[in-house]
Image (cartoon, rainbow, N blue to C red):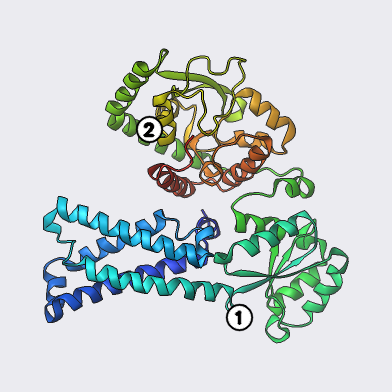
Amino acid sequence: MAARDWQIYLPRRAWQLAACEATLILAALASGFALRFGHDALLLLQDDGGGLKLGAVCLVCMACMYGYDLYDSAVLGNFRMSWARLVQVLGTVALVLALLDWEFPNLNLGWRISFDGLLVSGMALCLTRPLFLFWNRHPRLSDSVLLVGEGGLADKLQRELRRRPELGMTWAGTVETVQAGEMVARLARRSPERGGAPRRLVAALPGGWSAFAPALVRQLRAAGYQLEDGLSFYEQVTGKLPIAELAEQSPRFEAGAHLPTATLRAKRAVDCLIALAGLLLLWPLLLAVAILIRLDSPGPAIFRQRRVGRMGRLFTVYKFRSMRVNADADGKATPAGERDPRCTRVGRWLRRLRLDELPQLFNILRGDMSLVGPRPFVPEQEQTCLQTLPFYAQRWTVPPGATGWAQVNRGYCATLEDNAEKLAYDLFYVKHASLAFDLLILFQTLKIVGLGRGGR
């Protein structure tokens, strides 16, 4: 995965904030340690493994901050929400450290290192967030972006730039298409430093910068402007593809044209190893869940359903049954809703904890599915989407997954509009598929499942 793709998941300024806050936490913990032990602090840090313990406490703090979404868009741009989440983080960290100190007393992670350090850390972190908001919103400290061209893509980009301050970019305005040539020619005659013009220019009109004369584009680059194509800039900002605009501008677009055979083979090997390890480790849990399902309601423990896999091939997916038998009386699969009456008592908990998905480890071993990929749907739903949504069949160029980029960003789909949004994320995954990207998605999936989010 390219560096730019990592920034889509956690933007550049969020990475910078996380690094600064990790440094602050370490410094605060060391200060608290020094306040408590005075001149003996340095000796204890060297001889008693104090340095490693400080690092462990810092790691717990950062994991809790990530778990409470303190680096997500909705929280990064909200001062009041950031402070509320920081209080929750400090409380959770104190609880985790107390449990570790009680379970492993030889670690000495409790009062000896943590309490004073957590107090100092809390005060330091409460100061970093307003500074971060000031940094992002100050016009001289953020990248100013001028959109060249108007229409649907320009409107979408404008909304994204306004709602996501953690990107460190501000919207400087939009140039109408009829005035684009004249405006760009005027910008090319002066550098952004001297003219006060936005350094970043995004061509949001059909054809991107290829719609302008090559000499003019070279002149803009030589003057110091950073030129971005509207479609690729949208990917960078949102982590998904602009399907409607892409269909208009590049009707022959192929998301998976770059996928090398070696990548697919390596992905398959990793899938088999993880699925086999999961089955060997979790077989007692699988057995217990199957028994609970049989005791709770009549019918088989395993639910089988036909789904569409790679290259449009049909396969049978396995899941723990979470609904009563014959829940869909008309024979049409209906997506689960909130508090769906078709779910059994055990099934509600299975769906909430995502345990109903565990039998798909067998599908992964068989090669029907992968750990990460577009979520497979029933044939009827796939046919509806195929006839309605452009590029939909390109989801099938990679194996379907138990989790995926669309799942961690979008969750359940109930309408055609939901599936269109999900397709935008799926095609982004197909275009940028790699083992590193899979690891990133698995990490986010563990966070979502571990915190019980999005289950139905």
Q: Quadrant of residue 450?
A: top left
On the picture, is 419 further left or further right than 184? left
Mark 1: secondary structure: loop
Inspect this view and state whether residue 156 appears.
yes
Q: Is residue 256 visible?
A: no
Image coordinates of residue 162 in percent, x first then y, are 65, 64
**208 relative to 138 in the view: left or right:** right
The furthest residue to the top: 298
Q: Any mark on residue 275, and which?
A: 2
Q: Residue at x 84, y 64 (%)?
A: 177
* Residue 414 position within the rendered picture, expressed as x and y whole percent measured from the top left: 61, 34
Which numbered mark, 2 or 1, is in the foreground of this view? 1
- CA gap, disc 2 and disc 1: 50 Å
At horizontal 50% and vertical 64% (from top left) the residue drawn is 76
Depth check, front residue: 93 or 301: 93
Q: Which residue is mark 1?
A: 140
